[in-house]
Amino acid sequence: MENVVVFEHVKKYYPLYHHITGGFKLFLFNLPKALAQMRESKYWALKDVSFEVHKGEVFGIMGSNGAGKSTILSLIAGVMRPSGGVIQVNGRVAPLLELGAGFHPDLTGRENALLNGILLGLTKKEIASRLNSVLEFAELGQFIDQPVRTYSSGMLARLGFSVAVNTDPELLLVDEILAVGDENFQNKCFAKMKEFKNKGITIVIVSHNRAVMEQLCDRIIEIRDGAVATTVEQGPVEKADHQA
Amino acid sequence: MTSHKNQYYRDLLTALVKKEVKTRYKNSFLGYLWSILLPLSQALVFFVAFKFIVRIQIENYVLFLVAGLFPWQWFINSTQSSASSFLGNANLIKKTTFPREFIVYANVLNDLIHFLLSLPVILLFLLIYHQQLHLTTLLILPLLLLIQLLMTTGVALIVSSVNVFFRDLERIVMIIISIMFYLTPIVFAESMIPKRLHFLLYANPLSGLIVSYRDLFLQGTVNWSYVGVAALYSLFFFALGRFVFKKLQWRFAEVL
């Protein structure tokens, strides 16, 4: 089976950027010690994580807050580098941004959709040719030419999701996003994900909401203490059907 | 494939600059005029303070002032606003992989556009003081613009990248800028600097540039040693800026 994402013994630590707590004077007087301490203090977000995501599956990553879920997503997206281990990602990745992140409040929905499409890696021509399907899916009506600061959070989520799914990703990264938006829109997103799946597009979802995950995912891994604790094989995603 | 990439970079830069231009003065009545009114009001204050009170011996003093203040304004606007270039786009930087340095480039280009839009004001003062516009000015101006573009971009890259980790930098930059203003021949002429302090003209990266702008607008002359020094500084800062950015960019997503 073809793998879209492969993690092999991936480790990731964050240096702890603590501020000079004891005051500047104390810091200066103990300079060598203080510097050594700064260099050594690390937080191991991921200690040893290995998994692979197959082409066309909906892959869930669960874990409590601070377990390292979002770190994994950042590593897949390629905005961070691992401290150890090997990561392979094949194909075009589209992240789902949090509620209108990257939107400028004073620009209209249309202008923001164009800008966001470009930020996600499309040329102007590519996003312009898809703009109609973006706007259609987002269902914003005449609001599309209003500044997005007038939008509700559900509308922002719709527009954001709509841009992301229309960039023709091979791998869609979803981070706790579908919590917003009304039921109708959530169902639409679920349906879209199913459509993606059928087209062979891979989806990685991060959440701590077990119910939603079990409904959507083919496989779920649970991250605990910076390592993969359990892997759950699920049935196919059909369960989402009766909801839609 | 590379042509697609180049097309993408062009589109990205255009889109970001457009966004900056559209949003900077979007909710203000006077709009882009603000980028002219600020240096103009400064020129007025300096005119009163130095011409009437200090009685500085410089002809066409307002023209003299605006020829230095407008490029200075471009430089400090870009430097100050770059402090939040990455901090203010934390969400994008944590999720997407578009080349982040383009945020800074767009920022500096936006200020370049505002500077270009303010050039008619300098022309207006040339008219008021019955000075003529020299052909040399038009020929050499693009070179000065390029030098300032590189220098400003370099400094902006350093400030924006380092500020992600060390947020005090923003305040420090403000102090440095206000000191630099009086160390740069903007309100006074370089000829007023005592001979033994003349090396300061070369020690300050902005002096050569500002003096060159003024020579060009007021006399239509070029002093190549000033232009040369400014060009060297601009290459140095641009290279340093790229280096600092490249070193730090992989840790942006960790701290933002």
Image (spheres, coloured by chain):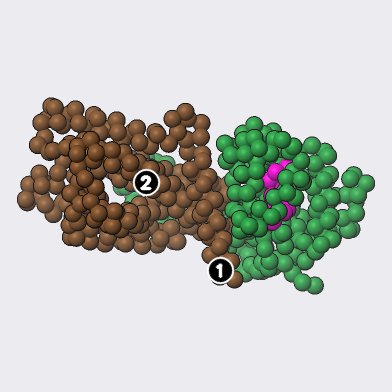
Chain colours: A green, B brown
Mark identifier at residue A171: none
Pointer 1 residue? B3
Residue beneath the point at 11% across and 52% down: B198
> Along the horizontal axis of the image, is B238 left or right of B27?
left
In this picture, which residue range is highlighted in magenta? A158-167
Q: Nearer the viewer, mark 2 or mark 1?
A: 2
- Residue A169 in percent (x, y) is at 71, 59
Q: What main secondary structure does the magenta stretch of the protein show?
A: helix
> Along the horizontal axis of the image, is B84 left or right of A179?
left
Comparing A88 with B35, the one in front is: B35
* Residue B218 appears in the figure: yes
Comparing A84 with B144, the one in front is: B144
Pointer 2 residue? B116
Name the subunit of mark 1. B
Q: Are marks 2 and 1 in contact (CB under 8 Å)?
A: no
* Residue B88 appears in the figure: no
> Along the horizontal axis of the image, is B79 left or right of A163?
left
- Residue B176 in percent (x, y) is at 28, 43
Residue A221 in which image quadrant: bottom right
Looking at the rendered structure, the kind of residue marked 2 is Leu
Residue A2 in which image quadrant: bottom right
Helix, strand or loop at mark 2: helix
Looking at the rendered structure, the kind of residue marked 1 is Ser
Helix, strand or loop at mark 1: helix
Quadrant where the N terminus of chain B is found in the figure = bottom right
Above or below for A164 versus A158: below
Residue beneath the point at 53% across and 60% down: B9
Judged from this view, the residue extending furthest toward the left is B195
Q: Are marks 2 and 1 on the same chain?
A: yes
